[in-house]
Amino acid sequence: MPTALVTGITGQDGSYLAELLLKKGYRVIGVARRSSTVTFERIEHLLDDITIVQGDLHDQGSLLAFLEEYKPTEVYNLAAQSFVPTSWNQPALTGDVTALGVTRLLEAVRYVNPRIRFYQASSSEMFGKVVEVPQKETTPFYPRSPYGVAKMYGHWITINYRESFDMFAVSGILFNHESPRRGLEFVTRKISNGVARIKLGLAKDLHLGNLDAQRDWGFAGDYVEAMWLMLQQEKPDSYVVGTGETHSVREFCEIAFGYLDLDYKKYVVQDERFYRPAEVDLLISDPSKARAALCWEPSVSFRDLVTMMVDSDMARLKKG
Ligand code: NAP
Ligand code: F7E
């Protein structure tokens, strides 16, 4: 039975990846940081089948200890301070976890067993103020937030360890991916939850920032399959993963509200508090390399993603 270790197991992607790995017959070791409240909401249904170890990307010793104890053959580094606006409020923490944390984990892998296959969760936020449309593996980066800058460091240190130490270190440059398990502060889930609350009479309006920002949004369940595929290739590499389509926040609102027979213009309030000091206006992927090399295809359309998220929030709120 192969063993995979996943950091960020309590996050959106960690939960889908754990499900996928279990289905494929892996023993799954999930790294969770200590917290005074329970953070296992997304993986509660998996707790009998996975092993949770306490660790933190700030803490080198904890990373070494669980690699030595569980001897994984694959390590997926999904842990990060991943919310872009927080990265302006806590830029040093974001750099420490999202950038330097990658080095700590790579170092631990190098010392314990450099043959371990390593996945780094890189991000389309690195493209930022895009210099090429659509964006592919060779597109130069121009990050627009401390988060984007930190992810660039993580991306390059992964490539550097691949080249310096001949490690199987892979960087997946994933475009936005969403699901009913997305954190409530990200715009897609904020909208699906917001519209459901309005429909059920629990809220009167929804305050959002820039409605014109465009993103290449896919379904998270599809994207964890791409992560796994990257670690099954003959050689380590970097891959862009996205749908190749882009949609605005406004379009997301139109579909989400329209699906519940509401007109978003009557409920959405544009609120300066949710604008960013520097915006990423347009992201759209060219995922040709991943499609050809990994035979990876997204399975959920934009419209189905929006309605899936609205349905899920409606059902959850109705249950109380
Ligand atoms: P998420 O839901 O925010 O999950 C982040 C995970 O990191 C959580 O499990 C969190 O634990 C953990 N974490 C935070 N700080 C940590 C620390 N110091 N030590 C150990 N664990 C820590 O993010 P996601 O959407 O699943 O994304 C997974 C990864 O992909 C992240 O690295 C993200 O930056 C990257 N990414 C995401 C997207 C996307 O669209 N979702 C696109 C490209 C790249 P707690 O539960 O304790 O907070
Ligand atoms: O914002 C606009 C906002 O916070 C998307 C992370 O997973 O994907 C995510 O980062 C867009 C931005 O995601 C609100 O200005 C408008 O243009 O959902 P988001 P993000 O910043 O794209 C990348 C790939 C990652 O790697 C990150 O970890 O929506 N927007 N109004 C808003 N955004 C939020 N959050 N809230 C609003 O009210």
Image (cartoon, rainbow, N blue to C red):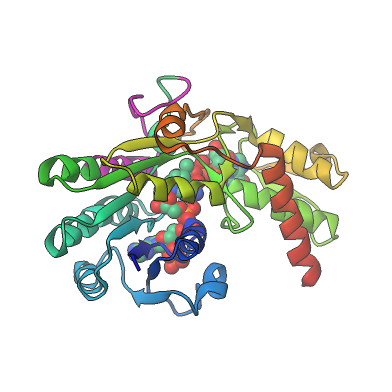
Q: Quadrant of residue 200?
A: bottom right
| Image-quarter location of ligand 1 | bottom left
Q: Is residue 282 left or right of residue 109?
A: right
In the rendered image, residue 305 lying in the magenta stretch gets the answer: no
Quadrant, the N terminus: bottom left
**Magenta region: which residues?**
133-156
Quadrant, the C terminus: bottom right
Q: Is residue 258 left or right of residue 83?
A: right
Q: Quadrant of residue 298?
A: top right
Q: Residue at x 59, y 59 (%)?
A: 181
In the rendered image, residue 149 lying in the magenta stretch gets the answer: yes
Looking at the image, the residue that sits furthest to the right is 261
Which of the pair 40/297 is nearer the observer? 297
Find residue 201 and report its horizontal and vertical position in percent: 85, 60
Find residue 296 and report its horizontal and vertical position in percent: 49, 38
Q: Quadrant of residue 131?
A: top left
Q: Residue at x 52, y 42 (%)?
A: 176
Q: Residue at x 32, y 43 (%)?
A: 233
Is residue 134 visible to the viewer in this orientation of the structure?
yes
Compared to residue 119, the image places residue 133 above or below, namely above
Find residue 83 and report its horizontal and vertical position in percent: 47, 51
